[in-house]
Every structure is written in structure tokens, then in C-alpha cells.
Image (cartoon, grey):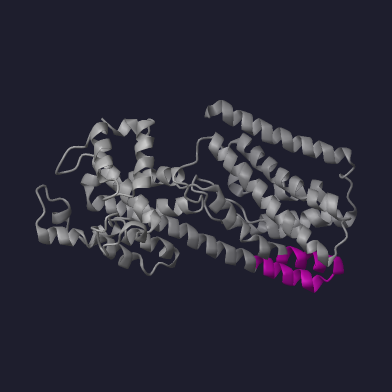
Amino acid sequence: MGNRGWAIFVTLIIGLALAFFSYFIWLGEAHLAFNELGLVVLLTSLLLLLSFGTTIESGAGTSSAIILPLVLPSLYLLGPLWGGIVAALGTIKPSQLKKGFPRHVFFLNRAMMFLAGAISSFWLVFLTDFQFEWINIWIIGAMGITFSFVNNSLLWVGLWVDGKLSRGNNFILFALERVRTVFISVLVAVIFIIVYQSHALPGILILFALVFLFRDVLQARFKHINSFFQVIESFARVIDTKDPYTRGHSERVAQYVEDLGKKAGLSPIRVPRLVQAAKLHDVGKLGIPEAILQKPGRLTAREYDQIKTHPEQGEELLNNIEMLDDLLHIIRHHHERYDGKGYPDGRKGEEIPFEARLLTLADAYDCMTTDRIYRRALSKEEVLEELERCSGTQFDPRLTRILIDMLNNGYYERHLK
């Protein structure tokens, strides 16, 4: 979109936030009682103190703050204007106050938080009278989901406009990971509201301890998830160093399976997981001697048998990583053939998992279109001929037709001669 698109986005979001702010001022929402002012200070200070910013990375150099346990009470007890102000001020990070941090990004972040709070609080404005009742737990839940959705939607649009979305980014997965925290956030928010309205000081102290504990649990989970993604990237780099002649193969295959998966109608939730499987599909080659992987001449039957063990070795290597359980069958079967003559299990046709068939095609396409130690890359005409020849034997015919149509429509022209 370029700098112009980014400037328009920043101006639009800050302008919308100012418009909402002015609207609430016009409605007379600015007036606060003394105890409400104290609540603003309390919640803002607690947000700043807890630094709820240790979260899961988006994959584009940003992260999403876990602030709902305190933002929801702010919106519920103080209304959209002051609740939005608490969200905007309480999420300021020390790094954003340092010299050199872009001022427009600082104000954009504040505006996004305020907008998310203002929009999500309309559930409260239109459906309740600001008096706590048990039935309003559902309203608090609706506010939490709306806040999470609006905040992440604005973040995603901003990344897209700024050109920072990279392969594997997926809004649905990113948003769902946030939504999973909404239930606990609502529970903590309800407890806070009950304790605050009962004026129970010991309860407030206990609640502070609960919020700190909640933060630590979430930080541990998100660090675990971040470590998972880092492991995938590290494995991909190690695979490349094992066979320098095919460097970049896993990344290219990841791009192809993403494109093919979308064209084939694969679920938006599964596409990023298939991308991760593509980055790991050759991990079993770590157990194959380099002399075989880099042999310039024809492999002996024994050497080829060793190469054929890498899907099983990959599955075995990753078998104890719980978060990869749903990828193991893709990695194991990515060298099966549609006619049943592949390996390791000789599965045929629909017996082969769909995502494995898709990965098989993407993997083979990259082999065709890159120079290898034993042959040159094929031309576009040769690739199309090979795809037609192997459709229904090596490759799934429906997926092969999708790839052929993509190539005929100009996909990957820079990779083809």
C-alpha cells in the first residue's frame, strides 16, 4: 500500500477516536464522582504496573496486550469514555516513551485501544442501565469478545496497509488465540466488579493477587506458543544447512502450499498449520548422511532406501512435541503417490491425507523449478508437461489441475524459465 496508504490509515483511526471522544463529551460523559476518579487512577495504575504486554507475537513484529481483566471493569463501571481512556493510558509501554519511538505510532496505538473500548461498550450503553446483575455477565462477555475482535482487526488492517504481514500470518488463528482468554478475563472482571461494589478491602487485595497470577499464567502460555513458532523456524534453518544445495526449499514449499491451499478451499485455520508442516517436512533428513544428500551422481539402491526413511524419521523426531501432533500425518505421508506406489506406507488416492497430497505437489513443483545437483531446473513448458503426465499417478488430479491453472494464469512467473 505504500506510505500514502499507511498515512491514510493512521489519520483515519486517530480521527475516528477523536470523533468518538468528542461524541461522548457532548453526551456529558466526562463528569466523574470522586470515587469514580479514584477508580480511574486505580485501574490505570494497575494496568501500567502489571505490564500486560508479554504476549504471543503476531509474526509481524507486533504483539497483542492481555488487558481485558482490567479494561472490562473500567468499561462496565465507568462507561465508554473513561473506560476507553483507561484502556488507552493503561497500555502505554515504557518503550513507547523512549526518544525515537514514532509519535504517530504512539498515538495510533492509543486511538486503537480507545476505539476498541468505545465500540465494545455499546453493548453496555444500549442493553443495560449500568447496574450490576448476574444476567449482565453475558454483556461483559460480549464486550470482551467485541473488544478483542475490534482491537485485533485494527491491528491486522494496519499491518496489511503497512506491508508487514508475512507468510503464515493468519487473522483467524491470531484472533482465536485472544478469544480463548476472554472467558478467564470475564471471570476476573466479574469478581473485580463484585468486590469493588461491596467495598471489601480484603477482597480487593486478594483480587490484586489473582490478577498477578492470571498475568503470570498467560505469560507462561504465550511464551510457550512463541517458543513453538521459534522451534519451527530453527528447524527450517537447520534443514537448509544440512543440504546447502537446496537452501530455501522449505520456505518456497511453504509459499506454494499456502497458495495452493487457499485455491483448493482449505480452511483458513488449517492453511497456517500446513505452512508450518511444509517448513518441517524434510526434518527427517537430519538423520541422513550428508554424503548421500549431496552426492552428485546417481544414488545406489541402498542409498535411495536411506533417503526414503526421512518421512518416518521426521515423524519420529517430532513425535514428542505435543503442539505438532496434527502435523505428523502430513509429514509422514508427503511422499506417498496417488497411485499407491509412494512411501513409506504405499497409501493410495483418498487414503492419503488431503494436506499431505497438497504438500506432495508443492514439494515436487519446487524440485522441478530449481537447479539440483543432478539436473537443471525445468522450463515452464516442461513443468506443465510433467504435471499433466503425473496427474492421477504421482499427484492428486484435482490439485494438479489447480496448480496448472495457476501457472497458466501467471503464478510464479519469476521462478520459471
The magenta-colored residue range is: 187-212
Q: Position of residue 399 (x, y in %)?
A: 37, 46
Q: Position of residue 110 (x, y in %)?
A: 68, 42
Q: Position of residue 227 (x, y in %)?
A: 45, 59
Looking at the image, can residue 28 be seen? yes
Residue at point 51%, 53% (across, down): 269
Q: Quadrant of residue 15?
A: top right
Overall secondary structure of the magenta section: helix
Is 401 one of the magenta-colored residues? Answer: no
**Figure check: 399 above or below 130:** above
Looking at the image, can residue 71 be seen? no
Q: Specify whether 398 is left or right of 313.
A: right
Which of 198/245 is in front?
A: 245
Q: Specify whether 109 is left or right of 20.
A: left
Q: Position of residue 370 (x, y in %)?
A: 24, 39
Which of 414/52 is in front?
A: 414
Residue at point 21%, 37% (across, down): 377
Is 202 one of the magenta-colored residues? Answer: yes
Which of 196/171 is in front?
A: 171
Residue at point 58%, 63% (across, down): 218
